[in-house]
Image: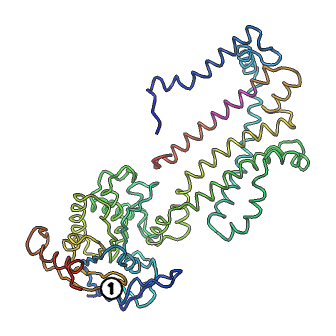
Amino acid sequence: MTLKPSSKLSWFLPLLIPAILLILWQIASDIGFLKPSILPSPLVIAATLLELFKSGELLKNLEVSLVRVMEGFAIGAGLGLLVGFTMGLSSRMERALSLITGLLRPIPTIAWIPALILWLGIGESSKVVVIAVGSFWPVLLSAIQGVRGTDPKYLEVARVLEKDSYTTILKVVIPSALPSIFTGLRIAMGIAWASVVGAELIAASSGIGFMIMYAREVSQPDVMLVGVLAIGLTGLLIDFLLLQLQKRLLKWSVNP
Amino acid sequence: MTALQIKNLNHHYALSQGELEVLRQVELQVQSGEFISIVGASGCGKSTLLRLIDGLETASGGEILLDDKIIQTPGLERGMVFQEPRLFPWLTVEENIAFGCRANTHESEKQKLVHSHIQLVGLLGFEKAYPHQLSGGMQQRTAIARALVSQPQVLLLDEPFGALDALTRIQMQQEILKIWQAEKITVILVTHDIDEAVYLGDRVLVMSNRPGTFQKTVPVALTRPRDRNSPEFSKIKKEIYDEFFNKTV
């Protein structure tokens, strides 16, 4: 239990510390403490942001990255749900797959990037696959946990009411696993977004990660930082949208 | 007419240090439309007996027959209400009740059944509410409606009001009598509340502890609605109470 600040304050509070930091940063730049070639001032970065936004370069790169994320996330999360439900529902399947999932899961997603470039080239497919791999694991684990966590008392109700296994899975197991699955999806989305930037930093000719890397090569620290900032903002926006979707879908849950 | 017969029922659980005998030589004949109360201390096996009647567990020995057919699995001709409402939190009141319908029920028929059972348990106006928005008593009403919507012959109640406060419990007891009279259904109620058992049952069966078996049957020949404060009521309660506490060993 935490104390809730009053409503006026609660809007203002998350902005306070960033504002102080920005002001200090701006002052440090103005007095020449920070070199513009290393770390440009907030006002310069803001101007660059506006310029890149107007020229369409920022949105174009963001769009390229977002499309990759959506494709990879759809494949990874879809497979995660499929395998997760199979493993959650059948202990035999879980046993059969336990060694291979246990071995592959600890491997960081970016460790696959060189191998995937070797196999798939530096085109779209290698990036989409990296994202799919990254999104797969959290969804897999949350689906297994969600299915396994179904209250046996609810399953007993389904038995008492003579429901077949199809109805029981659809009406009892899946809804009961949804809160856990949503947590997995949100984590997976975060990883997917991180993976696309990782993949683009290593090899790409477009996308937000490429924009950052290229800006470094041509010594444009302001463009570089705009890219970094855009990643943070987009990630925040995506998580916000997922949270809204979760609230809407899980309105029955007392604590969604 | 005999609806339910229990013949020489025995049940035991396998434990690591041997077997635990839960039920021994349980015999029971329930007439169609009868209201049976079973009282016993906690852990005496009364809930296990109900689970065996429902078919959730299989007895180690003996048999249970409903209309001369042996019970082996759960079936919709027996409705079950547990101590906890066990409503699905993701379904509204009407969706929870509709979940109790038979698989082949037509949609329009389903709507009619759900509506009439919402009316029966007094939940009109709460059709779209989610379980967490309801009080404990209303949740249990929903669970009763879900058990009744498939129109079972027998309603099995496993300490259904045990978790409710005293006033709500009395209200629910009156409610269940009303439902029993309206639906002309056979009811088997398991409880540890002697007052509840006498108030509701045509007969009260007293179950002994470890192993569980019926040690006494007390007929309750009082007209309904019964007055809990009448001397006759108290006399029957005392007779049952003595079975548990004042027995000379």
In depth, the one of B199 and A78 nearer the eye is: B199
From the viewer's side, name the closer residue of B56 and B91: B56
Query: Is-magenta flag for residue B8?
Result: no
Tell me, yes or no, whether the highlighted magenta stretch contains residue A231.
yes
Picture coordinates of residue B115 (x, y %)? Answer: 33, 59
Dot 1: element: loop
Residue at image point 34% right, 62% down = B112
Residue B100 sits above or below residue B68 on the image = above
In which quadrant will I find the N terminus of chain B? Answer: bottom left
Chain of the residue displaying label 1: B
Left-right relation of B50 to B198 = right
Image label count: 1
Give the amino acid type for the residue marked by disc 1 in the picture.
Thr
The region drawn magenta spans A227-237
Q: In this view, does B67 lie to the left or right of B237?
A: right
Q: In this view, does B249 lie to the left or right of B127?
A: left
For residue A48, above or below residue B91: above
* Residue B215, image x, y percentages: 27, 86
Residue at image point 38% right, 88% down: B9
Dominant secondary structure of the magenta stretch?
Answer: helix
Q: Which color scheme did the rendering employ for the protein? A: rainbow
Furthest residue in direction top, as rendered? A31
Q: Where is residue A7 in the image (x, y as percent from the top left)?
A: 44, 26
Give the residue furthest to the left: B231
Q: Which residue is found at the position 74% from the left and 23% from the top?
A: A226
Q: In this view, does A121 lie to the left or right of A191?
A: right
Residue farthest along the right direction in this orientation: A118
Q: Quadrant of the C terminus of chain B?
A: bottom left
Q: Where is residue A169 in the image (x, y as percent from the top left)?
A: 55, 64
**Mark 1 closeness class: few <14, some 14–19, many ≥20 residues within 10 Å:** many
Residue topped by disc 1: B213
